[in-house]
Structure formats: C-alpha cells, structure tokens
Amino acid sequence: MPDRHTARRPTAVVIGGSVAGLFAEAALTDFAEVTVVERDGLPDGPAPRRGVPQARHAHLVWSGGVRAFDALLPGLAAEIVASGARLIHVMGDMVSRAPTEVWFRRFTATHHRNLVCSRDLLDAVIRKRVLDDQRIALRPRTTALAVEGDATRVTGVRVRAGDDELTLPADLVVDASGRGSHAPRWLTDLGLPPVTEREINAGIAYATRLYRAPGTTADIGFPLVNVQANPAKAPGRGGIILPVEEGRWIVTLSGTRGAEPTNSPDAFRDFALTLGDPVIGELLERAEPLGGIVTTRSTANRRRYFEKLPHWPDGFTVLGDAVAAYNPVYGHGITVAAQGALALRTVLRSTALTAPGTARRRQRAATRPVAAAWDLAVGQDAFYPGAAATPPTCAAHAPRKASSPSRTTWNRPYSSPRPPDAVTVVVPSVRAQAKPSSPRPTEARPVEGQVEHQVARCVARLPHDLAAELTAGGGHFLVHGVDER
C-alpha cells in the first residue's frame, strides 16, 4: 500500500488574481493543488476591478500571446472571440503611423493576428475559464504580507484576511502580484542580496474615453487607428482608436513630459488634433462620448533582474509585471505574462515541482520572454528627455531602427520576407512584409450617412497607396477583404 504522505499532490500558492496570476494557475493545475491569494474581490463578469487601474485604456494581445493563450487553455482565444472580441490581421486591420512618421502599408498575407477587445471582457473570460477548475481554490480579499522560509527555500505565505493573520504552507509560491510586488523586499528579508532593478520612464500620461462608434462603423470591422509618438520630437504625443465589443471605441491618448493629456472633456478631442496626424481627432467629431475620461501616470518601464541573483530559493517563482512592467502603449504585458506561465509549465513537465535545486531553472525560463519585449519598449522610451539616468546604448538603438523602414524598402514593400512573430515587435516594419503581389479587394462595404464624409476627409490626407485601400468611388470609406493566396 502506498504511503499516504508521499502520495499527496504538492501545493502551490499564487499571489494575484489578475491575468498573470490566472495563467500561472492554469500552468500549475496538472502538478499541484492551487490556492489563489487575491487582495480584492473579483467580479462575476466583465466589470472594472480595483487592482487593474490600467484596464480602462486600450489593450491588445499580440499573436505570440494568442498562441500562448491556446497552449495553456485550448480554445481560449475562440471563447474570447465568441464573447465579442476580434482577431485582427497585423497591419491588414490596422491604420498605423510609425514613430518615424511613415504610414505602414496594409496587408493580410500573414498568419499573425492580434486579439482586440476591452480589458474587462478579456479578464472575465480568462477568469471564468481558470477558476471553474475545481483544483483551484480562491481566497479573495486576502493580502499577502510576506513569504515564509529562509534563503534556501520558501515554505509558504503569511497572509491577512480581515482581522486574521495566518500562514499558508506551500511547496511553491508564485508571485504574480504585478507592478506593486514586494518580492525584492521579501527576498532581502530572507537573507538574499538586493535585486538589481532598472527603470526607463518617459513620463508618459494616458487619457482614455469610451465612445459609441459613429454611423455604421460598428458593423463593418472598422480598423484600429494608431498614431505613434516620435521620440525625436519631444514632447511626444500619440493616440489610438480601438474598436471593441458592443459597438464602442476605446480612444486612448498619450503624451510625455510637457504634453500630458488631462481629464478635461473639453480638451480631449483638441489634444487628439495635435498629434503628428490629426486623423484620430477628426474621426471623433461625430462619435458620441460614453462617460468621462480616465487618466493614468504609472507607465514607467521597470525590470527586476531576479534571474541574476547569485542564489535563488527553492519553492519560489516570480512572473508577469512583478518581473518586468512595460509602458502600456506597447501592449507587451499580457502576452509576456502568458508566455512566462507557459515556460513555467514546460519546465514542470520535465522536472518535479518539489525537486530541490530546480527553482533557478524555473525562474530563468519564466523570465526568458521578458528580454525581447523589454528591449523594444526601452528602445523607444529611452530617447525621451529624462527617461533614463544614462544615455541609450547601442542595444537600445537596435529595436528603434527595426521599426524604421528604409526609403528603398518603402518603395518596394513586398520584396522582403514575412513579418517576425508579433510578440517581438511594437509594430511590424514595412521591410517585413510578405509576397511579391499586391493585395486584391474582394469585398467592399461603404459607411453611410454623415460619417461617410467625415471619414473620407480623414483618409484623404494619408499616403496615396494607403488612401487608395481605404477609399473608392465617390469618397466612400471602404473596408475590404484581401486575397491571402
């Protein structure tokens, strides 16, 4: 008869019930009984949550993140789409102006697709899918105070629930508590040296307002419209229109030091008109606002180099924004969180969760997806005045140049290989486009009514080849399909 003690399943405690925590829980369920410690209460459906103040702003999931979603939770992306999200072609369903002030060509000859919806919807579908698993126990309104153990091994978490304090023993503790993680202090309290940290802060502020999509634009698959800031012309201003579920637009405007958008309703559209191209402000002329304006200033890129500590305690892993938090404009956070959880699961499939001496391997694997996203984010933000204590390095210049199409390749946009995985790019370069043949329209649907003229006015100023894809006939706005052969 087997020993009852040795046959027990290991236990894991995950700190944080946001996206990074949910994916960590999904990665762990095959290997342990999982308890989730969440400081706040969790809503039952798509609704704002106190612990995610950035949720009001525009979000998207890059194609690498979509693949990680389905690898962790098969069919998850389809569930999110069935609930109202869209899978959009990278660049084909986007009208995007690069930091170099060049409009990217639109094409769909690529397998890369981004997932687009409100953050409330995204969180709700993931949360339900994960927490419906009976192997996961949720402890809401419970605050993690410290980890227990010593410099060689973490053995549990001390928590507060109401007026009570208790210790939750665990074979593995995963900190997925986000930007506000206390992991560096917890580790030094255990006797480990301080964790090296780096911050690149462009001083970016965000202002977001929800709109009802004007006219019939909600029914035609309206493209994402993005005007990126140019770091060479500080202060930088940028903006995005993100069409989401229920016929709405999430409009997020951003500005660096000296050009921060405010929460004034009267100033919102005026700010959009001051971007490098006023197309977003002009598109808002006939859009109906749905509520007030939400602002955020906590946008610094911050990385903690846990993997470089000389020693790492068994029984402890850090994931998501607790390792690296990015300027939200780049959309890396959710994708990297999913990929980090997937890397954790991969290690656990070959190494027992309780095996001594393997925690460093898990931490390094979970950190690996961070590097490319970090380099790309700081490769833009480091060039703004006051963003960093030291000037940008040669490595920081590389991702900036990667999004700068040469004049030659702009004139020959289909002469190069297909785009790299979209998790590793801020926006795909026109150099990285597939197929030596021009897209061919297969379907066209005009926007009707007064909005038709307004949108036509906006796209009239775009580069001729891009405007030709957006307009036809008497200046009607067209959304068309494209042959992918």
Image (cartoon, helix red, strand yellow):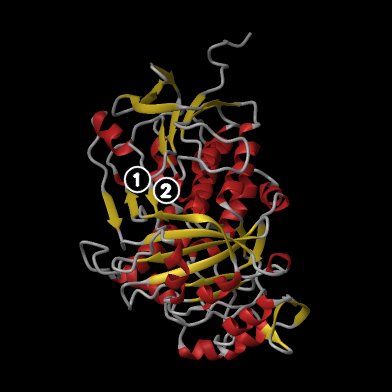
Q: Is mark 2 on a helix, strand or loop?
A: helix
Q: Determine whether the residue tagged by mark 1 lies in a helix, strand or loop.
A: helix
Q: In this view, does 172 lie to the left or right of 484?
A: left
Amino acid bearing label 2:
Thr
Q: Which residue is drawn at 34% across and 45% down?
A: 307
Answer with mark 2 or mark 1, whichever residue precedes in sequence.
1
Q: Name the residue under label 2.
A: 367
Which image quadrant is residue 231 in?
bottom left
Residue picked out by circle 1:
307
For this rendering, which residue is in front, 171 or 335? 335
Specify the amino acid type for callout 1.
Glu
Q: Which residue is drawn at 33% across and 36% down?
A: 183
Residue 341 visible? The answer is yes
Label 2, residues with CA under 10 Å away: few <14, some 14-19, many ≥20: many
> How far apart are labels 2 and 1 at the CA level?
7 Å
Percent x, y of residue 318: 41, 40
Return the x and y of residue 230 as percentages of the image width and height: 38, 76
| Position of 134 relative to 3 (above/below) | below
Does residue 465 lie above or below 314 as drawn?
Answer: below
Residue 232 spot, x, y in % from top left: 33, 78
Can residue 372 be seen in this snapshot? no
Disc 1 packing (10 Å; few <14; some 14–19; many ≥20): many
